[in-house]
Image: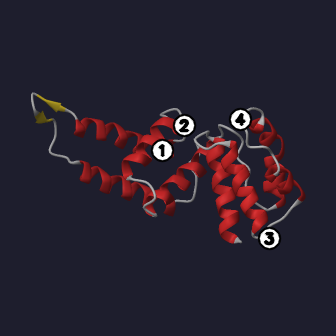
Amino acid sequence: MHDALARLQDAAALWSVHPSTAADVIDTACDCLVVGIDSPTLRIVAGISPTRGNESDELRRWLEGALTELSLTYYPEGSREGEEAALRVMARRLLAQTIAPRDLTSWAYRFITWDGTPLAADLIALDNAYDYVDSVYNGHPYTSTTSADLDADVIAEARRLINDTTALSY
C-alpha cells in the first residue's frame, strides 16, 4: 500500500510542474483503489475520464482534497515546493537507474528552468556542460571532460538532493 501512496504523491508532484499528465495521476489513483487505499475524493479522482480535454480542470478541482484525505502533500501548479518535490522524484528515478543522468539534466532544464527552484541550478548547469562536452571545434573536443565525468557529477548531485530534504528558502 505504501508504494501506491508514494507513486500517487510522486505523480501529483510531477503534475504540478507539468512534465506529467492528468492521466498519470488518475492512473495512480486507480492503482491506490486496487490495492485497498480508499477515500471519497480519491474515488472521484480515479473516476475522472483521462481523455484529452477537461481532465486537467477536473483534476485541479479534486486532487487537493484527495491528497489531504490520504495525508499526502498537495503542490499547487508552478509552486516552488512542487518543483522541489518533482526534482527529488526525478533524482530518485536516476538513482534507481530508470532514467539516465543526461535525462535528469534535460528534464531540469526543460521543466524547472533557471527561473525555478535554486535546487535545480547545478543540474541545469550540468545540462549546459553536456552540450559543451559534446561540441567540437575543427574536429577537436573543446575540453578533456567526458560525458562519463558529467554523469558522475549528475549522480552525485542527485544523491545530494535526496539526502538534503530541507528546501532552500529565498
- At label 2, which amino acid type do we have? Gly
Number of other residues with Cα within 10 Å of mark 4, as a class: few under 14, some 14 to 19, many 20 or more: few
Instruction: Quote the CA–CA distance across marks 4 and 2.
Output: 27 Å
Q: Are marks 1 and 2 in contact (CB under 8 Å)?
A: yes
Q: What amino acid type should be assigned to the residue bearing mark 3?
A: Gly
**Disc 4 from disc 3: Cα separation:** 28 Å
Disc 1: CA contacts within 10 A as few (<14), some (14-19) or many (>=20): many
Q: Residue 30 in the image: x percent, y percent?
A: 75, 58
Q: Which residue is mark 3?
A: 36
Amino acid at the residue labelled 4: Arg
Q: Nearer the viewer, mark 1 or mark 3?
A: 3
At 46% from the left and 58% from the top, the residue drawn is 98
What residue is shown at x 21% (from left), y 48% (from top)? 146
Which colour style is shown?
secondary structure
Badge 2: few (under 14), some or many (20 or more) residues near its Cα, within 10 Å? some
Q: CA distance from mark 1 to mark 3?
A: 36 Å
Checking the image for residue 116, the label placed there is 2
Secondary structure of the residue carrying numbered label 4: loop
Q: Helix or strand or loop: what does disc 1 sit on?
A: helix
Q: Nearer the viewer, mark 1 or mark 4?
A: 4
Q: In the rendered structure, which disc, 1 or 4, sits on the residue that comes first in sequence? A: 4
Instruction: Write the residue at 63% across / 55% down.
Output: 10
**Badge 1 amino acid:** Ala
Check disc 4 and report the residue beneath it: 52
How far across and down, in percent of the image, does residue 170 sit?
57, 41
Residue 154 screen position, x and y as percent: 37, 52
Which residue corresponds to mark 1? 120
The alpha-carbon separation of the residues under discs 2 and 3 comes to 37 Å
Label whose residue precedes the other's in the sequence (4 or 2): 4
Q: CA distance from mark 1 to mark 2?
A: 7 Å
Numbered label attached to residue 37: none
